[in-house]
Each structure stands twice: as C-alpha cells, then as structure tokens.
Amino acid sequence: MPTLEERLAALEHALSTLQGEHVSDIRQLNERITALQEQITEQRRRQAGLEQTIGQRFDSLEKAISWQFTAIGQQMNQGFAAIDARFDEQAKAVRQQFGDVNMALTALTFTVKSQGQDIKTLKADVQEIKDRLDRIDVSFDRVDTRFNGVEQRLDKMDTRFNSVDSRFDAQDKKLDQILDRLSK
C-alpha cells in the first residue's frame, strides 16, 4: 500500500495535470470569446450603417409624403374656393329674385338642388382623397418590401465577398509559399 507521502505526491501530480488542461481550455475559450466579440462589433457597425441608410430613406419618403399632402391641400383649397364662388353666385341670384314669391321658390328649389349636388361632389372628392391615401399606403408597403429585398440582397453580397476574400487569402498563401520555395 502506498504511503501517505506517495499518495500526496500522486494527488499533486494529478492536480497539476488538471490545471494544465484547464489553462489550455481557458485560453481556447478566451480566443473564442475574442472572436465572438469581434464579430459582434462588426455586426454593430453594419447595423449602424443600415440604420443610417434607412434613416435617409425615411427622410426622403417623408419629403415625398409632405409634398403629396401639400398638393392635396392645394387641390382642396381650390375646390373650396370654387364652392365659395358658387355659394356667392347663388346668394346673389336669390336676392335678385326675392321680390317675386313664385320666382323665389323656384330659385330656392334650384339652389337646394345645386347645393345637394355640391355636397355629393364634396363627398365624392373626399372619398377620392381617401382612396388616394389608401393607394399611398399600399405604395409605402411595396417600398418597404423592396427595402427588405434590397437588404437581403446586400447580405448575400456580403457573404459572397467574404467567400471571395477567403479564396484570395488562400491563393496569396500559396503564392507566398511558391515564392519562398523559388527564392531558396
């Protein structure tokens, strides 16, 4: 049976062997962590670039929407001006024909019909504006879908460029080896 000192020496030897293995494992883990941190940093850099690009796209989109709303507002103002002009003309006609009751009733009936048509026209115009806004929303959805497609294509291109870079690196190493052998 081994002595206590022999057992202690064997235990110390086993402990130093385990510590040596753990140091190697820890080094490998540290290298992997460093590589992961570098990848995370690169992804964050790419994300910042994409966020800036998307921000620029949203700014241009906002300008386009603002321009369209301004154009719609101008069209509405013109429509309201035309309606105001119609109302002014109708009031003038009612005042001129007010002396004769029969003529006044006839003019009033005509005015009511005309205003009803104007209201129907306004409702139709408002519905047309709603339809246009719906089409704009659909267009924005399409633009968003296109942006997503472009983003996917850019990711694929990044992958391809990385593959090409690794191939070039491999070719560079081979050429360096050939040049090294030729120089000897």
Image (cartoon, rainbow, N blue to C red):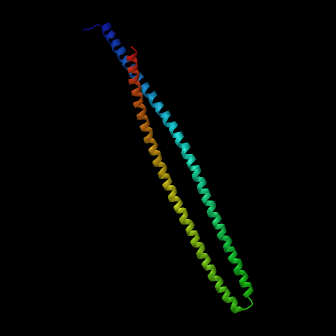
- Closest to the observer: 23 or 87? 87
Residue 85 sits above or below residue 166 on the image: below
Q: Residue at x 61, y 63 (%)?
A: 72
- Closest to the observer: 75 or 105? 75
- Closest to the observer: 98 or 13? 98
| Location of the C terminus (image quadrant) | top left
Q: How many marks?
A: 0
Q: Residue at x 37, y 14 (%)?
A: 16
- Closest to the observer: 120 or 75? 75
Q: Residue at x 33, y 9 (%)?
A: 9
- Quick one: which residue is furthest to the left in this view? 1
Q: Residue at x 57, y 46 (%)?
A: 55
Q: Tell whether 115 sits left or right of 132.
A: right
Q: Position of residue 26 (x, y in %)?
A: 41, 23
Residue 29 sits above or below residue 113 on the image: above
Q: Position of residue 94 (x, y in %)?
A: 71, 84
| Location of the N terminus (image quadrant) | top left
Q: Tell whether 125 sits left or right of 174.
A: right
User: Which corner quadrant of the image does residue 125 belong to?
Assistant: bottom right
Q: Position of residue 50 (x, y in %)?
A: 52, 42
Residue 54 sits above or below residue 123 on the image: above
Q: Position of residue 73 (x, y in %)?
A: 64, 63
